[in-house]
Amino acid sequence: MKKIYITLALMLISIFSLQAVDFAGGNGTSEDPFLVATAQHLNEARNHLDKHFLQIADINLNVVPFNMGNYWIPIGGNRQNNEMGNNFTGHYDGNGFNISNLTIVQPGNHNVGLFGHIGEKGNGSTTLKNIVLQNVIVIGGRGTGALVGRVTGNQNTRIENCSVAMGYVRGDAATGGLVGSNNSFMETSLAAEGFRPVIFQCSADVSVLLRSEYSAGKIKFGGLVGCNQKGMISHSYAMGDVTINDAEVSYVGGLVGCVDLRGIVINSYSTSGVYADNSSNTGGFIGSLGLGRNMGVIVNSYWNTDNNPSDLNSLGAIGLTTAQMQNAQSYQNWDFYTIWKTETNVNYGFPAFRDETNSAKTEKSWNGSKDNAWTNPENWTPEGVPANLDMVVIPGGTPNQPVISQLIIINELSIEDNASLNLEHEDAAIVITGKLLGGNESTGTGSITGKGYIELSGSDRQYLPAMTFENLVINNISNVQLSGSIYVNGLLKMTSGQLDLSGYEITLGEDAELQEKEGENISSRVYGSSGVIRTLRILNNPSGQIAGIGLEITSSKDMGLTLIERGHGELNGTDESKSILRWFNIEPATNEDLNATLVFHYFTSELNIYGENDNFSLFKRKSNETEWVWVPSELDALNQKLTAENVNEFSTWTAGSSDSPLPIVLLSFEATPLNHEVEVSWVTAAEINNDFFTVERSVNGVDFEAIHFVQGAGTTSHANHYAVIDHEPLTGLSYYRLKQTDYNGDFEYSNIVSVYTQKAALADMKVYPNPSNGNFNIVAAGEKAIDYKIFDMQGRTVYTSVARAGMVNHVSLPQLKQGIYTLVFFDTELITHKIQVY
């Protein structure tokens, strides 16, 4: 027995020892990430693709087996095609430590880099940050980059503060120094606008080359990123040369090869030399920007004209000389306080990233000891009015709460629970370039009041905590995301960028208004796959826009207090038809006979899988139902709105394609025995191009025959009731179904229903009078006597007899108490009658 215990103990020690080799510690959660200290630890990450990792030491990949054979194998992703497979969907923090001597030799394979394919669909998040790559050799196919081969993600997929220096990256297409392809999971460029994966504060200083052995589809090469379709690059740069010189190659740029399909680049630059004399669509900054509504956007970005031929295009970026690019004053609206710096001996004098520890931030806490004036130095601890870079804290419970009467610009503002800030004049404002914090992120009770406004105008994505605002302005092209539900009493103005609901709510007060806008290829609006905008309004004889949320209701009726919600999630039908990315839920106090007109506005960026020229209609459903009903509506594509008239009640409304409508199904389909006949009846909620119905019958539920044809109603949004009689039904169990045929010959079947039809002799049993005082008659058709019994409600037999065929059988049971009884006839089949005694 002792040997068994010793052996078991040794086995357990061995198991724990093997587990310890996987990582230096941690369990893979956000609170306790796997600790990565060696090349073997890094390699083990491929077996935990959705976990959290923290690097705690420099890692040299010039060790066996990563310096031989195929060398490093990318972490995550299907390298045989571009589809999303076993992607990396976790979070890796390099913690500023180096990963050196990365070598990958995967010629022709897709999605090649330290990480192969990252990101996921929906609302999940994936992060790579603080990763430093040095001395790389990366050879791959389509989708090749030193850090990541391919990104297919959402707005929560982020690569931030990552860099690569020294070495080269060589690929077939979609090849960049740091990332091969940065793309949204959304199918269309319009819908992807709010779901762009982000590359923030990243750099690449490696050579980018074409793999000469490749012969087809050679496109999209860039110093930082090969392809940024439907993606975002912000505050980043590239310095390595891009060398192609192949007549078959197109879309070559110093920073990125292409930025079409509404991709966006913000506050970035390139000093890369672009050598692509024989290639088409080449630029010092980007190769292709796209056209029309699919055109990408370049904001405050620059490229070096001294390092490039004079015939390269600029395409939205500004060309500067080396001397100009080494001067911070050349960069419009760049943050040289917290993000960028220029120093002669750093980055060759070009802008470099500022260490956060070097940013001159000071925390200022309001004490309100003297009065309520923001500008009084004695109201602050430490003493002095906050400067632009300061972090400002407004606690609750101070003697005075601050009042602002002018424009203030600060980096961070924290308004704790029960604290308030008064912007007393219309021209009073606080512009926040960094973080806005509340006491409790999701349920905070801080407030900002007065006639002025608060503006979020950051360089990176900002967050809105739970708080009450009077007027709020969103002016951040990198977007703002809710981290709690907010309440707005006045104006919510979208100036630049988008506001992601992220599962929370925006409540607009009774006088509040939302202002959004959409340009040719970019919009500034509220969106989010979950969460709602909500308002309560008293609608007495309503007319016109309601709260600026894109909904108009006109009615001569008093609808009373009405709840209106706007959401942006995709509403699916039972046949996988899809709505656009906007819906309204409307719940008036009075919700019948409204005879209203509804105007449903939408943005082109909410069209989801549809194109601008698709044929759209409105659809509605009640809150407790799952099926959608088509609503006749007039489309005004130029002004992006749909109008429905003669609306008598409201519920949940959305829009979808009339060519592939949301499912419209039968409200009911039934087969009911009537004596020895069968009534087949059905009700439609609405019909589109419906030519006729065919009622079909079957003895086995497989082989059907047509027994009736009924003309359809064509196209209508009203309920229609139909019924036919099968005068000669099959005896016993039979089946019915409905076939609906369109004008173009397309058809579909209903569900199958069954019915049991009794023999005619049994069906002709009659009982009268019913109800009775216990004295009644039984008439039995047919040619033979039939046994019967009478049962009370407890199932007890109270009478047994025989009904003789072809005559009236009198039954006298005056002793029966008042109630309901069951009369059962026994033959080869059972037939029952309910009788009532009074």
Image (tube, helix red, strand yellow):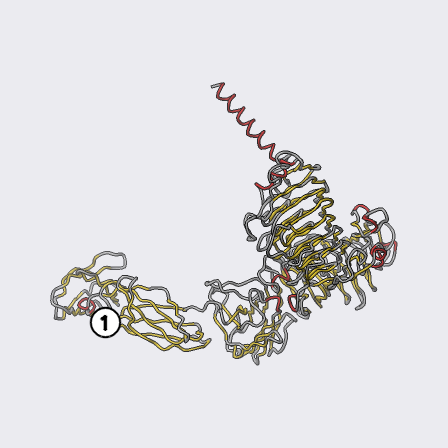
**Number of numbered discs on residues:** 1
Residue 438 visible, this angle:
yes
Residue 484 visible, this angle:
no
| Image position, residue 455 (x, y; %) | 75, 62
* Residue at x 63%, y 77% (from the top left corner): 544
Q: Is residue 354 left or right of residue 768?
A: right
Q: Is residue 755 left or right of residue 602?
A: left
| Image position, residue 340 (x, y; %) | 80, 52
Q: Quadrant of the C terminus?
A: bottom left
| Image position, residue 111 (x, y; %) | 60, 49
Q: Is residue 386 left or right of residue 622?
A: right
Judging depth in this view, the residue of 95 and 458 nearest the camera is 95
Name which quarter of the figure residue 793 lies in: bottom left
* Residue at x 63%, y 73% (from the top left corner): 546
Which amino acid does the dot numbered 1 rest on?
A: Glu
Q: Secondary structure at mark 1?
A: loop
Q: Residues within 10 Å of mark 1 (few under 14, many from 20)?
A: few
Disc 1: which residue: 728
- In the displayed orientation, state which residue is furthest to the bottom: 556
Residue 761 position (above or below residue 485): below
Judging depth in this view, the residue of 616 and 86 nearest the camera is 86
Judging depth in this view, the residue of 472 and 160 nearest the camera is 160
- In the displayed orientation, state which residue is furthest to the top: 2
| Image position, residue 33 (x, y; %) | 64, 40
